Amino acid sequence: MPQSRTAAARPVIAIAGLGIESSTFSPARTQASAFHPSRGAEVLDRYPFLAPGAELREAADWHGALVGKSLPGGIVTAAAWAELTDELIERLAALPALDGLWYDIHGAMTVEGVDDAEAVLLERIRATVGPDVLVSTSMDLHGNVSRALVHRSDLITCYRMAPHEDHMETKERAVRNLVDLLNVRACGAPRPVKAWVPVPVLLAGEQTSTRIEPARSVYAAVDEVEATDGVIDAAIWVGYAWADEPRNRAAVVVTGTDRDAVSAGAERLAQGFWKARHDFDFVAPTGTFDGILDEALASAERPYFISDTGDNPTAGGAGDVTWGLTRLLARAEFQDDDGPTVIYASVPGPASVETAVSAGVGATVTVTAGAEVDDRHAGPLTLTGVVHAIRHGDRDAETEVVIRVGSVYAILTRLRKPYHHEHDFTDLDLDPRGADIVIVKIGYLEPELFAMSAGWKMALTPGGVDQDLVRLGHRRIRRPLFPFDREMAEPDLSARLVPASDAPLTGDDE
Ligand SMILES: [Zn+2]
């Protein structure tokens, strides 16, 4: 047996990637600055498992190229794409010869004029670093996996939990598997075998949370397949429902050393997902916005959370839809200061924030916010109230203000921001645990909010990430596809063995 690499011969690995979920049903556009790119050595700071002294840090010679992650949003502009990818490629080209590359992406990026953006970028990366480099791709399970992306990767995996409590664990697994693979490759082992199965199902994340059935059991099988002899990694992608490209759908990939084992594992996972398709349901009871407000007012559960789902910024909504807050402020129950306390998060409105900041806490202001990007459902909202709080320096919002109108505490921001943590509220002198109702532009509640909620329902509201997928008007997705074609015939869920990254990809895409 050849010896494994010595410390002096540790593999040289680069890190690169861009991540966003971009909704093609939102009028918003995403610019380069939204990706907050890390460059060079600072890329390593993103990952605790690559901290100085950590085992994986010492196992290779790491080189950050460029890694950028954006909040979900609208389509990435062609100019932003050119700027970011040109810099990423230039930085890779300047690195020493590589043995491996970790491709850290999300997998649901839509770019003006580009289909299958992450596979296109990986093709450019391969053209730069050469065919011998081993690539490990790690993704969000709401990413999409084309045959081309599998082909250009040697290892490919994704999260196994939604909400993504295992996001860092997944990245670490992708990196560890890459280091292990480089070490066995140095001893002459072949590239991994990759079995891919596209599954003709496209569902919202809110219907596929792994906290509940059937996704819990469907995903539990991933660990069992991964534990099989001859398997390195196994993954199921739900896909991203709010973009309209042929690649948007669920998929399974199993990688390993044994053709039969990876094929059998991939087919098992694909069958499990397909068979559960009719059982996927929203993670919380759903209803109309006003209907749920009625139920919340009648309920004794406090605090009662309501997800205003159609404009969820963490799924790709523009974030500035005013429809929900407009309805809320029109309700008679909240007109008086001593009415039931409602917190509403949030609506961006830069001019309204500026006015509130100039006036100061305690002042009464009249401001207009929202509907600068997405005005299809309601126009800009004008409200008069008392400035309750002002906060500067947030990474996403930059500046946040709270305006109290009657018994409603409305959060307005300079830029859009997701509200996922208790401190997002308490930092604004708000007490979500003591409130009667908390309304958040979100889909499924993130863990802290979920733990805090006594009651919870999801309002099916309009916006760029409308949960009623079939009414959105997809045109380019591959059909038949569930639930667009509910009565479709049984699909071919046999495993497709995708050629190694250094062999040609032949045959039609499917
Ligand atoms: Zn996701």
Image (cartoon, rainbow, N blue to C red):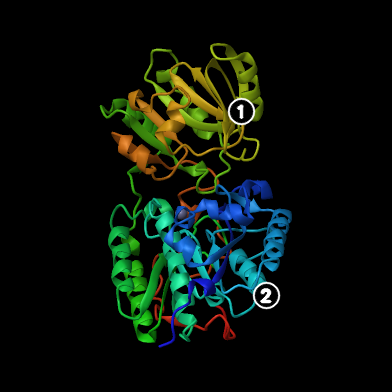
Q: Amino acid at mark 2?
A: Ala
In the picture, measured across the screen, residue 480 lies left or right of residue 380, that is left
Rate crowding at label 1 as few (under 14), some (14 to 19) or many (20 or more) other CA atoms within 10 Å: many
Residue 237 visible in the snapshot: no
Above or below: residue 110 compared with residue 501: above
Instruction: Give the residue furthest to the left.
Output: 300
Viewer-closest of 101 and 235:
101
Q: Position of residue 131 (x, y in %)?
A: 61, 80
Rate crowding at label 2 as few (under 14), some (14 to 19) or many (20 or more) other CA atoms within 10 Å: few
Residue 179 visible in the snapshot: yes
Instruction: Measure how far apart labels 2 and 1 are at the Cα level.
Output: 47 Å
Q: Kindly identify the residue that appears in the image at 65 percent across and 54 percent down.
A: 76
Q: Which mark is drawn over residue 91?
A: none
Q: Kindly identify the residue that appears in the image at 61 percent across and 35 percent down.
A: 415
Q: Is mark 1 within 8 Å of ligand 1?
A: no
Q: Quadrant of the N terminus?
A: bottom left
Above or below: residue 216 compared with residue 351: below
Location of residue 93 (image quadrant): bottom right
Viewer-closest of 3 and 472:
3
Q: Amino acid at mark 1?
A: Ala
Q: Position of residue 173 (x, y in %)?
A: 41, 64
Q: Kindly identify the residue that appears in the image at 59 percent across and 80 percent down.
A: 132
Location of residue 379 (image quadrant): top right
Mark 2 = which residue?
A: 127
Viewer-closest of 199 and 84:
84
Q: Position of residue 101 (x, y in %)?
A: 56, 69
Viewer-closest of 39 and 244:
39
**SS at mark 1 in the image:** strand
Mark 1 = which residue?
A: 369
